[in-house]
Image: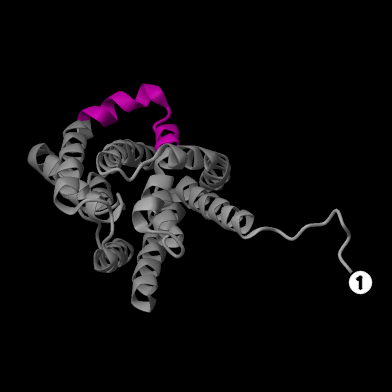
Amino acid sequence: MDALPFIHPISAAAIAWLAVAAVFLAAGIVKGVVGLGLPTLSMALLALWMPPAEAAALLIVPSLVTNVWQLRPWPALGPVWRRVGAMQAGIFAGTLGGALLFGAPAGAWAMVALGIALIGYAAWGLAARPLHVSAGRERWLGPAAGALTGVVTAFTGVFVVPAVAYLQALNMTRDELIQAMGLSFTTSTVALGIALAGHGSYSGSLIGESLAMLVPALTGMAAGQWIRSRLSLATFRRCFFVGLILLGAYMVARQLAA
């Protein structure tokens, strides 16, 4: 029997946009639960069918808005900023400097190295004593960790290494850690957007497409935060580290299978 005249097959473009929306929904849920993962998971999945530079440009708006959302509650942001503000300067300088050296994100083997680093760090966090940075070392180690994170961001479009390891080593509370990661990822997103625009990789059409992905990203993040609010601190830590392992394993497997 012929198809009814008012039923049309879904176009390839519509399927592609549904897939992109599903990526941002899933990444938003992960970010809502553990406070990170939206850029990493989005980059890994979107790069299956688009160039890394285009994928990085597409995640700019969802990443920026979800990270700003993660900065709440605003009254608590001041103490967190005073503690990690110098790190943000390092991130900004490292990202722009790295963009001058490497151009748009396009490092396949860098993704493998990042994945291995995430797995190793998370495994240490699950099986051993957590890393600790003393107050006396924060003054110089924060900017250094930020600058290295910026270089890695420029090379790969991923914000988490070594920023997450450094922030987790500061022995913050769960809410402080989530807020500090939101601050660092916001800085990375803004710096990466400037770097992409400087290399001509961030067109007006991509801005509109990136804006459209806000709905699935925010929906996923709200669902993830609802889940997180019902987790104990110990369960949250396990989810945090297991989430890093899964992200790292996927990054390695995807690149080795390519």
Is 230 part of what is drawn in magenta? no
User: Which residue is depicted at the point 24% across and 60% down?
Assistant: 129
Q: Nearer the viewer, residue 57 or 118?
A: 57
Is residue 232 visible in this depiction of the protein?
A: no
The quarter of the image holding the C terminus is bottom left
Is residue 220 visible in this depiction of the protein?
A: yes
Image quarter for residue 109? Answer: bottom left
Q: Nearer the viewer, residue 11 or 56?
A: 11
According to the picture, the residue beneath numbered tag 1 turns out to be: 1
Q: Nearer the viewer, residue 182 or 158?
A: 158
Give percent across and percent down for residue 188.
Answer: 28, 41
Decide if residue 13 is on the left or right side of residue 125.
right
Q: Residue furthest top?
A: 75
Give percent across and percent down for residue 230.
Answer: 55, 46
Q: Secondary structure at mark 1?
A: loop
Disc 1 residue type (three-letter)? Met
In the image, the segment drawn in magenta is 64-82
User: Which residue is depicted at the point 25% across and 54% down?
Assistant: 161
Please give the count of numbered marks on the rendered protein.
1
252 is higher (above) or lower (below) than 150: below
Q: Residue furthest bottom?
A: 257
133 is higher (above) or lower (below) than 115: above
User: Which residue is depicted at the point 28% across and 54% down?
Assistant: 105
Give percent across and percent down for residue 41.
Answer: 42, 57
The quarter of the image holding the N terminus is bottom right
Image quarter for residue 177? Answer: top left
User: Which residue is depicted at the point 28% across and 56% down?
Assistant: 156
Q: Which secondary structure dominates the residues rendered in magenta? A: helix
Decide if residue 214 is on the left or right side of residue 94.
right
Decide if residue 133 is on the left or right side of residue 242.
left
Give percent across and percent down for residue 10.
Answer: 70, 58
